[in-house]
């Protein structure tokens, strides 16, 4: 009997809830002098850094405690520059100084993250550029292995389906990784990240032009924002994370023992 050769592809899609929320913030400043700009950006940066430190208590080994809402945060250096309107002379009185500094905070507690976002959008000089959803490294490693095994099982099932119908037995003789395994976020319904539309050009542009940045702690402020400002807690809906994997397997017929 002529040998039988079957080539099939196997795939898998495994979905998990995110374990981390990554908040990316830009702090901006504008003024007549570099000192004014630096002071504005630094003041807001210090307030938010203090908040993140309070949410990220450390153990004796300098790692976050098991119940820390924030597992890590970092900031860039302050960048300042002078801007002159197009066509104006370099010494134009309309020239302004601008500054920028970025903060990144990684949350494990999404409820606290909602409260922080609700507070941060009240700052007139802060833009929330993005909120990303991630898995831990350990979960990624486990999920990758599980997905590859599931892809192989899918290929074996396909080959067995074909061979069963024609009454032959087959065994795998070659396996090729699909080369396109990856993590991705499942599409979100188009209602807006938080069910509301705040801000302008960025995810949450600093469109709330209050006279000053809100102060105090996460759950209370010495200078409460006006009633028209967003609530102190927003309903975040994390996007599920999906790992996809594919494989190509070659099977050949085997003789019955």
Image: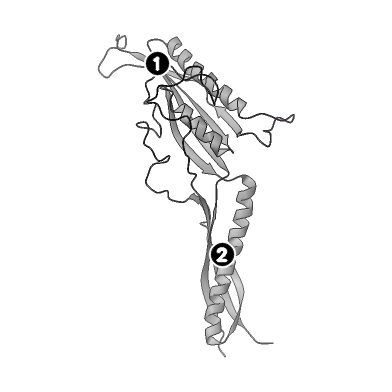
Quarter of the image with the N terminus in it: bottom right
Q: Nearer the viewer, residue 215 or 91?
A: 215
Q: Position of residue 104 (x, y in %)?
A: 53, 31
The picture quadrant where one finds residue 30 is: top left
The residue drawn where x is 39% and y is 29% is 205
- Which residue is farthest right? 60
Q: Secondary structure at mark 1?
A: loop
Q: Residues within 10 Å of mark 2 (few under 14, many from 20)?
A: many
Question: Is 215 left, or right, of 206 in this rendering?
Answer: right
Q: Kindly identify which numbered label has been placed on residue 40.
A: none
Q: How is the image coloured?
A: one colour
Q: Secondary structure at mark 2?
A: helix
Start and end of the magenta stretch? Answer: 61-66
- Which residue is farthest left? 87
Look at the magenta stretch and give its main secondary structure: loop
Query: Does 64 lie within the magenta span?
Result: yes
Compared with residue 254, is residue 16 higher up or lower down, i.e. above or below? above
Q: Position of residue 103 (x, y in %)?
A: 52, 28
The residue drawn where x is 32% and y is 16% is 84
Compared with residue 212, is residue 159 higher up or lower down, i.e. above or below? below
Q: Kindly identify which numbered label has been placed on residue 151.
A: 2
Q: Earlier in the sequence, mark 2 or mark 1?
A: 2
Q: Position of residue 52 (x, y in %)?
A: 58, 27
Q: Nearer the viewer, residue 150 or 15?
A: 15
The residue drawn where x is 66% and y is 87% is 256
Q: Nearer the viewer, residue 10 or 177?
A: 10
Q: Nearer the viewer, residue 62 or 219?
A: 219
Label 1 sits on residue: 211
Compared with residue 147, is residue 83 higher up or lower down, i.e. above or below? above
Q: Position of residue 204 (x, y in %)?
A: 40, 32
């Amino acid at each position: 009997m002529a040998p039988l050769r079957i080539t099939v592809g196997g795939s898998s899609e495994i979905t998990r809830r995110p374990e981390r929320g990554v908040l990316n913030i830009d702090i901006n400043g504008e003024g007549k002098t570099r000192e004014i700009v630096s002071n504005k950006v630094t003041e807001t940066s210090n307030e938010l850094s203090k908040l993140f430190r309070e949410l990220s208590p450390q153990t004796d080994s300098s790692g976050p405690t098991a119940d820390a809402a924030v597992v890590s945060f970092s900031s860039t250096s302050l960048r300042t520059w002078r801007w002159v309107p197009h066509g104006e002379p370099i010494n134009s009185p309309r020239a302004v100084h601008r500054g920028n500094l970025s903060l990144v905070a990684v949350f494990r507690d999404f409820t606290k993250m909602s409260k922080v976002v609700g507070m941060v959008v009240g700052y007139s000089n802060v833009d929330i550029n993005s909120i990303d959803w991630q898995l831990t490294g350990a979960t990624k490693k486990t999920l990758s292995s599980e997905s590859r095994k599931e892809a192989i099982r899918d290929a074996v099932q396909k080959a067995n389906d074909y061979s069963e119908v024609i009454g032959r037995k087959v065994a795998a003789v070659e396996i090729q990784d699909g080369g396109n395994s990856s993590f991705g976020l499942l599409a979100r319904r188009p209602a807006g990240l938080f069910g509301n539309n705040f801000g302008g050009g960025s995810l949450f542009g600093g469109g709330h032009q209050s006279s000053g940045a809100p102060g105090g702690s996460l759950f209370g402020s010495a200078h409460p924002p006006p009633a028209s400002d967003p609530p102190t807690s927003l309903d975040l809906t994390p996007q599920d994370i999906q790992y996809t994997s594919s494989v190509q397997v070659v099977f050949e017929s085997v003789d019955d023992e």
